Amino acid sequence: MSTQKRILLAKMGLDCHDTGIITVAQQLRENGFEVIYLGLHNTAEQVVKAAIEEDVDAIGVSFLSGQHMAQTRLLAEAIKENEIDLPIICGGVIPDDDAAELRNLGISEVIKPGTLTEDILILVNRALKV
Amino acid sequence: MSAAESAQVRDHEEQIFETASGLTIEEIYDGNSIENLDYERDLNAPGEFPFTRGPYEGMYRTRIWTRRFQVGFGSPKESNERIKYLHQNGANGFVITIDLPTSYGFDSDDPIAAGEVGVTGVAISTLEDMENLYDGFGPDSVSYALSIRPPVSSVTLAMLACVAEDKGVPLNTVIGTQQNDPFYQMSGGPLQTTTQFFPIQGTLRLCLDNIEFISKNMPRLNWMVTNGYNLRETGVNAIEDGAFTLAHAFDIYRMAKARGLDINKFPLRGSFFLSCSVDFFEEIAKFRAMRRLYARTMRDELGATEENACRMRFSVQTAGNTLTTQQVHVNIVRSTVESLAAVFGGAQSIHLCSYDEGHGLPTEESSRVALRTQQVLAYETGVTKTIDPLAGSYYVENLTDQLETAITNKIREVDELGGMAKAIQDGWLEEQINAARYKNQRDIDSGRKPLVGVNCYTIPPEEDTPVKVHKIQADEWGVKRSEYLKQYRADRDSQKWNDAMSKIDSGWKNNENMVPIIMNALRNKATMGEIHEAMRQAQDWSFR
């Protein structure tokens, strides 16, 4: 059995700032992860469905236009409804106050802009508990 | 050794002598560096072909660059109140930002709009929304630049024309701008944003319908602002920025020409929105090179015979992607350097990013600092008092030449692929963008590209300045707008609405100009989302 970790990355809602998430996808691939990137404009249901189908170890989402609270709430609800237990990692432009609230919603890690690859790997591995 | 440490010692061991786009920088430039420069042919006076030294005679001595105010949040009424307040305080030019659902042609009550209504800009779904946005103002007296692209810009243009007619304002006196860039208006890579919700060929057709309608009926309205800014923000360099921006604009010009529009006339109301990044001299050279290359291409390849049609005008925003989330006040320095480069590059309008961009929407305070930075440059430093002061510099002229050549070569690559629409659809542009993204990150990780506060000169997060940002009320706005639209649709004459909607179908299929047809639909209370759905159906196209 492969020990390679699988991570699902997706943009949710209508925000189309994708430079961060596409770059992170590549950084993770170069560091031994298998990454499935769903592209832009996904609903919470689409993300959860893909996570189940692809049997991933974690979900990563990214927001740069202020939808992080609304969309993450929807994602947390969809995960609960589908009774799956997966760490969620959230990246992007997220105010400090909101980052604390996201953790209350069950988000494992919040990754800010300007995080170097070595630190991203530390945060992702911490979310995966490896 | 960590990347952060290696970047800190790198200063003393080695430096990389190249521009951000990779052009070699010599230790010294001299007369040999510009031996082929011919003053009249390559520079000439400001306002004279090829406009290298500036598009206008007098430049900032006649008028300092425009400092437009960006407005747009929540409902049209709330945005209009803000515009009225700013207008009373002396502003008469506004950039109206639009929320994401509207930017994609969705009504505020579409399920896809959940959590997005009024967040990144104002929501516009009905003709009444546009009337409310213009409450108290005539479209011939106050200038709105709508950050909107086709297909949606065909609807906002039709709304604007209806508002003008209803207020008794002749169309040929309407001022303002419809951004109308079919490819680069949304942030991020353009492949998915230009193909997911509307067919790209339909988008191009509406872009040209708008240009045709505006150039025939609304000669004072700007019909397209090519948005190089959002493209540059994806991470491409100055050469790619110049090339992808100009190649795209020239493609649209060729299509407009093919529709029978006059190449000496319609370009007068076309302009550009460009980014100014932090590599000071390369950005200045980019602006000067783009102006010269534009002029030469318009004359030699597109057949413009009047100098006026060869004059490139652009507004500049400082580069958001050079700002850091860490140690935010350092961003004020970056934006200052970038806006100074925009001044030396001869921009017609400048907007500075707020220093807190990496945390959220700007506050009143951070917006004020951005405006004051420009005012210090404009009124204290004296940099405006002679035109194009860097002209004749061995380095700047040499670099301007190199940029012009490199941009020209890159444009040829796009032309050989069959133009920008094809380069986007085939995924070629996305590959170019992604390569740039990966390179930027590798260079930051390795310290090859020093980024103060990120890979060098860092401080622990707990010592960093706490940042307060503007709070958004997306849920509240969404509920209000849903109730409003429900009532709007209930109050209309369904037979008239039906007739107007079927005219969209026949008009599309008969290749008519869609703007008057959309005006009719709006007057019969069709909404933004309904009009888009009808146009999709007319193309036998669906995405849901």
Image: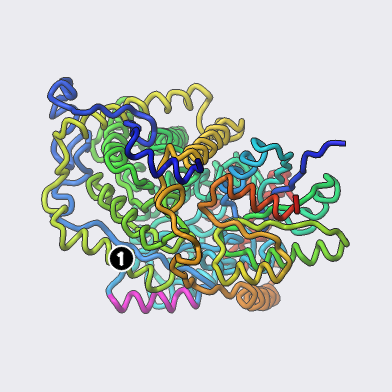
Q: Quadrant of residue B401?
A: top left
At x 53%, y 54%, the residue is A113
Kindly tell me whether residue B491 is visible in this rendering.
no
At x 60%, y 40%, the residue is B191
Residue B185 pos. (x, y %): 50, 49
In the rendered image, the vertical position of residue A105 relative to residue B235, given as above or below: below
Q: Looking at the image, which residue sits at the far front?
A: B1
Range drawn in magenta = B78-89
In the rendered image, the vertical position of residue B425 relative to residue B113, given as above or below: above
Residue B397 pos. (x, y %): 20, 31
Residue A124 pos. (x, y %): 68, 51
Please state which of residues A14 and B152 is positioned toward the viewer in this rendering: A14
Colour scheme in use: rainbow
**Mark 1 — on which chain does it sit?**
B
Q: Quadrant of residue A69?
A: bottom right
Please state which of residues B432 and B331 is positioned toward the viewer in this rendering: B331
Magenta stretch holds residue A66: no
Determine whether, in the image, residue B428 is placed left or right of residue B212.
right
Please state which of residues B248 and B252 is positioned toward the viewer in this rendering: B248
Q: Quadrant of residue B140?
A: bottom left
Determine whether, in the image, residue B403 is placed left or right of residue B129.
left
At x 45%, y 66%, the residue is B463
Residue B158 pos. (x, y %): 51, 59
In the rendered image, the vertical position of residue B196 relative to residue B19, given as above or below: below
The amino acid beneath tag 1 is: Leu
Magenta stretch holds residue B86: yes
How dense is the environment of label 1, judged by Cα within 10 Å: few (below 14), some, or many (20 and up)? Answer: some
At x 80%, y 56%, the residue is A86
Read off the residue under disc 1: B371
Kindly tell me whether residue B410 is visible in this rendering.
yes
Determine whether, in the image, residue A47 is placed left or right of residue B380.
right
The local secondary structure at tag 1 comes to helix
